[in-house]
Image (cartoon, rainbow, N blue to C red):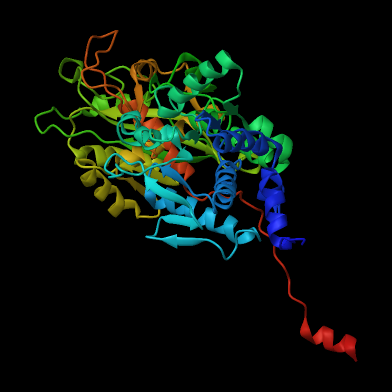
Amino acid sequence: MTCRLDPDIRLSQYLLRRPAEFMSWGARFALRPYQVQAILPVVESVRRSSGLSFVWIFPRQSGKDEALALLLTYLLALDSDTGGETVFLNPTLSPQGETSMRRLETRLDMNTLTQGRWKRTHGYIYSIGKAFCTYLSASPSARIVGATANRLLVVNEAQDISPLKYDKEIEPMVASANATRLFAGTRWTSDTLLEREYRAACADQARDGWRRVFFFTAREVRGCLPAYGLTVDRAVARLGRQHPLVKTQYFCETVDAQVSLFPPARQALMHGSHAARSQPEPGKLYAFLIDVAGQDEQAGQLSAAALEHALDDPARDSAASAGRDPATSAGRDSTALKIVEVGLDSLKLQGRPTYLAVFRREWVGQKHVRVFEAIQALAQLWKPLHIVIDATGVGEGLWSLLDNAFGGRVVVPVKFTARLKSDLGYGFIGMIESGRYREYSPFPEHLRRQMDACRAEIVPGPGKLMRWGVPDGTRDPVTGDLLHDDDLMTSALCHQLDRLEWYLPLPTTIIRPKDPLREMDRNF
């Protein structure tokens, strides 16, 4: 007596022996070669219960999460009769975990061998028959002790997950069955969980010859996906090849957690060939950038002679040219103004303007009313398109005065938060690296000393926040006075201009309407 298997069962058995074909079954796309390279060794380790530890390093938006969803779809089908537990961790359950779950559901529905067979329970557990995949958060506050992974443990975006969290609560999940482990993500700083496991996997790989590390950059991806290469080229043109986000997100290079934000090479990119100016040039566009310091009611007022001298020679960095009293201003924070010329020719190629610093001025210990009067006088001369001002804390008063005088369309307030200052730092670096920001010549010595002293720290976590600035208590190496970052901050505020809408001016064109009487004559 001959027993014939159902055609669907035979097809399923055939495809389960061929993981790459199974994952592409019913899908509208084929797996890319580098995805297949990364997936198949993980499948083999799971099937043989080898307990190997793999590391996937993919550039951003190159198909890592799609590969993970297809891998899980296959394992759910493979273990549906015999049983198996997979645990999938993301740095957060919302939105990262939710995004991963939606991607898995899409793959389960697209594959004709899994659609209609899967279930979702408790909001985060997926199953087909006896096989389960549980999604969890690896945030520091998440309570995940007790989960078990006897087939596969996936640690996604491992660069954003605390090594302590992993060692204490996540790694024990695989202990009972020595399950396969997969760390996936994009490189960031050298002290992350992903980087630690990458080094360990490289060592194991060198020892026994079994490939555990699958490392791809934008170069490999663009070979399979030309459109991806165009996106990377635009990012490099906009931010520069050495920008931290370009280096890590596309070329998978690490950056130091604590770094000098403006090394000599980056400062060199800021050197312009133009001279400082004491008045505007006809036909040029200008913007004001203002970093506000607290006012000192006891400070002496500017004399008329000092004010006249400062307006005559605004580019000099000395205390006299800035209207300061050298005897009383040493080491004190200042309200700083920088005027930049806005060039729109770069809009065609880079989509953003260029900025040339042409004028600098600062006030130490002056009442904000007097500072406002000076800025108002300068605005009447330079006629700025926009005035970007630090409106945080003590800056609100000066912002309010300027807003009443010039209106909200001209005055752009900046309310500093940790996120905004981080974005400001990343954005300013991008402007420098792409050649869109230049200081006048000779390069301001005061600014150079602030940049030399500036330090940046990358905060662990998915937000990739950057704390940066001149550390409190830093002394000027030349004068010995306390060193602030007021001049540096006015330059960085230029990034706020980048967030505005800019358009190339077009010549006026008059379109003359047709004469309806003449049109009627022609018709007759």
| Whole-percent x, y for residue 247 in the image | 54, 28
In the picture, measured across the screen, residue 146 lies left or right of residue 425, that is left
Residue at 24 percent across and 13 percent down: it is: 475
Residue 68 seen from this side: yes
In the picture, measured across the screen, residue 112 lies left or right of residue 55, that is right
- In this rendered view, identify the residue nearer to me: 459 or 191: 191
Residue 232 image-quadrant placement: top right
Residue at 56 percent across and 63 percent down: it is: 117
- In this rendered view, identify the residue nearer to me: 60 or 90: 90
User: Is 422 rendered above or below residue 505?
Assistant: above
Query: Which quadrant is the C terminus positioned in?
Result: bottom right
Residue at 57 percent across and 66 percent down: it is: 116
- In this rendered view, identify the residue nearer to me: 118 or 189: 118
Task: Residue lying at the far front in this picture: please name it.
Answer: 1
Query: Which quadrant is the N terminus positioned in?
Result: bottom right
| Whole-percent x, y for residue 457 in the image | 34, 26
| Whole-percent x, y for residue 400 in the image | 25, 50
Q: How many labels does the image show?
A: 0
In the picture, measured across the screen, residue 9 lies left or right of residue 523, that is left
Task: Residue lying at the far left in this picture: please name it.
Answer: 298
Residue 215 image-quadrant placement: top right
Residue 361 seen from this side: no
User: Is 199 rendered above or below residue 514?
Assistant: above
User: Is 139 rendered above or below residue 102?
Assistant: above
